[in-house]
Image: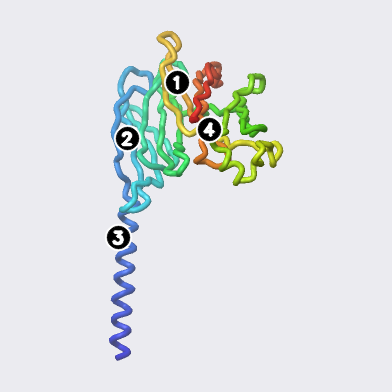
Amino acid sequence: MRHIYTFVLFIILLFLFLLQNVYAEETTTPTLIQTYHADVTGDNKPETIKLLGTLFSSESAYYREIWAEISNDQNQWQIMYPGGYDPSLQFVDLNHDGIKDIFYQSATGGSGGLYSYQLNTILDTVLQKIPLPEQTYLSGSFQPHFKVNIQLTATSKPIKVDVQAREEDYIRLGIYNKEGNLISKNKSVMIDPIAFFEPIKISASKGYGLKSYQQISGAYHADQLGTVETIWYFENDNWIIIKTDWVPSI
């Protein structure tokens, strides 16, 4: 009887070992996501750009590893990217040197609707990474009488948002009392990082820039107050703000 149990245990362990090997093979085999053809070196000949990834598992749409393989007749390059869902590449001259840059994006899959981005360029056969723009100043705070101040720059006049319609929620959360007075002094709103970038054409003479979308919420993330939409332009190795708009949700 003991020999039977030992044999059954051996079969189970062997099955688990083989299953693990099959699973490992499925999740480490690269997947060709898409093949592109674009001139990203400025030689007036299109390079072949293969976007590849390794899925987290055979049942998942999340790529835990993503990279691009770029090649022409003389050179090859590889770019490693953050993992994510639905990765894609765009080819736009964002640094205005006359050569198309390689703009990557993928969804993180989180509740905030955030995306991962990366911008690369090839100059004289050398692969370089261009930092993406960041908001250096944004602030928002609850004010008495169910008002919120949103300030887009250090010197701009605050934008006043009326949150009277949400007073019951804010009273319950202990931000205001029933008279509309602040219980928590200097209570700040929630400012998300930039969630989304998209290349946009600024003008025929200036070429392309980026437009960013950044959400501002009240007491919690689903309590959306509005979105800061900013147009950026790359100039003298820096991103400058051309325009910033507040788009209210309420």
What crowding class fits label 2: few (fewer than 14 Cα within 10 Å), some (14-19), or many (20 or more)?
some
- The residue labelled by disc 3 is 22
Q: Which mark is residue 225?
A: 4
C-alpha span from label 3 to label 1? 43 Å
What crowding class fits label 3: few (fewer than 14 Cα within 10 Å), some (14-19), or many (20 or more)?
few
- The residue labelled by disc 1 is 94
User: Is the residue under label 2 in contact with that under label 4 (CB below 8 Å)?
Assistant: no
Name the amino acid type tagged 1. Leu
Name the amino acid type tagged 2. Lys
Name the amino acid type tagged 4. Leu
Mark 2 lies on a secondary structure that is strand
Closer to the N terminus: mark 1 or mark 4?
1
C-alpha span from label 1 to label 2? 21 Å
C-alpha span from label 4 to label 3? 48 Å
C-alpha span from label 1 to label 4? 31 Å
Counting from the top left corner in percent of width and height, residue 222 is at 50, 41
C-alpha span from label 4 to label 2? 40 Å
In front: 24, or 232? 232
- The residue labelled by disc 2 is 50
Mark 4 lies on a secondary structure that is strand
In the displayed structure, would residue 212 be above or below residue 28?
above
Counting from the top left corner in percent of width and height, residue 6 is at 32, 84
The N terminus - image quarter: bottom left
Looking at the image, residue 99 sits to the left or right of residue 231; the answer is left
Closer to the N terminus: mark 2 or mark 3?
3
